[in-house]
Amino acid sequence: MDDRLQAAPFGVLAVSSDGALTECNDVARELLDVDSDPTGIAVAEVVPHSVEDSLLSALEGSSVSETSFEEYYPPIERWLDVSVVPAETGATVYLRDVTARRRAEKTVAELRAERRRTAIVDETRSAVLRELVASSSRAEIEETLARELGERDLWTFAWVGERRLDVDGLAVRSVAGRTGETFEAIREAIDGPATTPEERAIEQASVQVAQPIAEDSAVPERVRLAAFGDGVQSMLAIPLSYGSTADGVVGVYAGRTDAFSERERASFETLGEVAGFAVTAARNRNLLLSDTVTEVTFGVGPDSPLRDVAATLETTLALGGLVPHENDAILCYLTPEEAGLDAVADAAADSPEVVHVRKIDESGAVEVEIRGSTPLLAVSSLGGTVRRATYEPDGGQLVVDLPPESDVRRIVSTVTSEFDVDVRAKHDRERSVTTAREFRDELADRLTDRQETVLHTAYLADYFESPRGSSAEEVAASLDITGSTLLYHLRAGQRKLLETFFRE
């Protein structure tokens, strides 16, 4: 071989007309992972096989044509740029390693594909959100989720399920897309002893992923086999959660092994949270607009942090109000019948579930922040309204208003199965719905003339805007009163407004 070709930075093979190697430089031996001198050996035994075997095909026949191509060779895990040039006695083959470039291109292509998928996911999420805003019932929300996810080209099908009340498992609420045999296998699985990813998503209130499905033992075998036959390779189970509670789930199935990246999972998780909020909002809307509500009285067992405080102090604690927070937390405002505020605060602070305690001396209440799942938080998350609650040394009582119809059974079943509570009483109660005019009339009766004038003037002067259109001094000057007098009347008026809104 010519010295220049022997020292070339690329591989060079000289092949005779009968397909034997006559010369091979060191770079070619390294690229082909050949240890000994390959001269005299058939090229088919030296060059590793590829899917197409393009090099061997190019060297076949009585004459060789000039050609070039790039091909992947699995035995040596390399991409090679191959050029075949005819010679007088056969052919010369030039080899260049292009693996690094190919991998970089693949990475870029994968990133672009992921960005395209993420954009579609975000577009779908936006479309679903627009639909959810207009949805007035859980059924509409479930149909929207299944339709918008299942009928997209990016995924094969989607289905929505909810907890069953009578037995363990899920009930199918809506499905859309090319379901094939896979969905039938899912139907069988959710009624059987094995736990599906969708059921696990509800139990753990967290997103579950299986990709590829065929290799994930957490997916029931019947589903894995059906998915393999349908060409379904990935799935994602998204809980419909609000607060710490999830009683619905969306299963999304796709034909790619890597259908759900970390970024896409995060987008779906957000979608599940928004959909869970929409379900709760629909329940609350039904509760607010209903002339009839179901009043349920729960008996609270000894496994309760607030009952523990009452038992420690041998007193009764009345719940004055509550405000759910994020991260499974809830603020409770408690009024003791006999014990002092200091004693209640100290006893509550000793509870491992309590993360914050504060006395409110003027109202005679104690603010307690409880972290973790509780009946109070569960009822609020599921759309119920806590009307009153008391905690005594030997137990407690929780009275809630629940939305009408089937949601009552669902909420009661969820709360009693997850917490140490039981149902003491349940009955439907008629209630009058306050109109906007009646609300304004009631508020006007409670406000003094001066308070109404101050509130109205501050409102028209954009005092409550951010940034403010008028300062307190400017509003006070327009009313010919001092700034301190203005703030006094504002606070008094706002207090009455909030009392009218929050209290029945």
Image: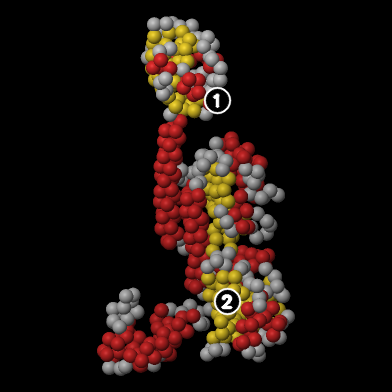
* Occupied quadrant, residue 299: bottom right
Q: Residue at x 49, y 28 (%)?
A: 78
Give the answer, above or below, for where 231 lies relative to 126: above
Q: Residue at x 52, y 68 (%)?
A: 326
Residue of label 1: 75
Q: Residue at x 48, y 20 (%)?
A: 26
332 sits left or right of 15 in the view:
right
260 sits left or right of 164 in the view:
left
User: Which colouring convention does the figure follow?
Assistant: secondary structure
Residue of label 2: 356
Q: Residue at x 53, y 26 (%)?
A: 76
* Occupied quadrant, residue 349: bottom right
Near mark 2 (Cα within 10 A), the count class, few <14, some 14-19 or many ≥20, is: some
Residue nearer the viewer, 206 or 79: 79
Q: Is residue 437 visible?
A: yes
Q: Secondary structure at mark 1?
A: helix
Mark 1 vs mark 2: give the one in front: 1
Residue nearer the viewer, 147 or 364: 364
In the rendering, at what x and y percent does residue 38 appear?
53, 14
Q: Is residue 443 visible?
A: no
Q: Amino acid at mark 1?
A: Pro
Task: Work out whether mark 1 precedes mark 2 in sequence or the reverse, and give the earlier one.
Answer: 1
Give the answer, above or below, for where 75 lies relative to 202: above
In the rendering, at what x and y percent does residue 43 appear?
51, 13
* Occupied quadrant, residue 82: top left
Q: Quadrant of the N terminus?
A: top left
In the rendering, at what x and y percent does residue 462 appear?
30, 79
User: Total of numbered circles in the picture?
Assistant: 2
In the rendering, at what x and y percent does residue 30 appear?
50, 23
Q: Amino acid at mark 2?
A: His
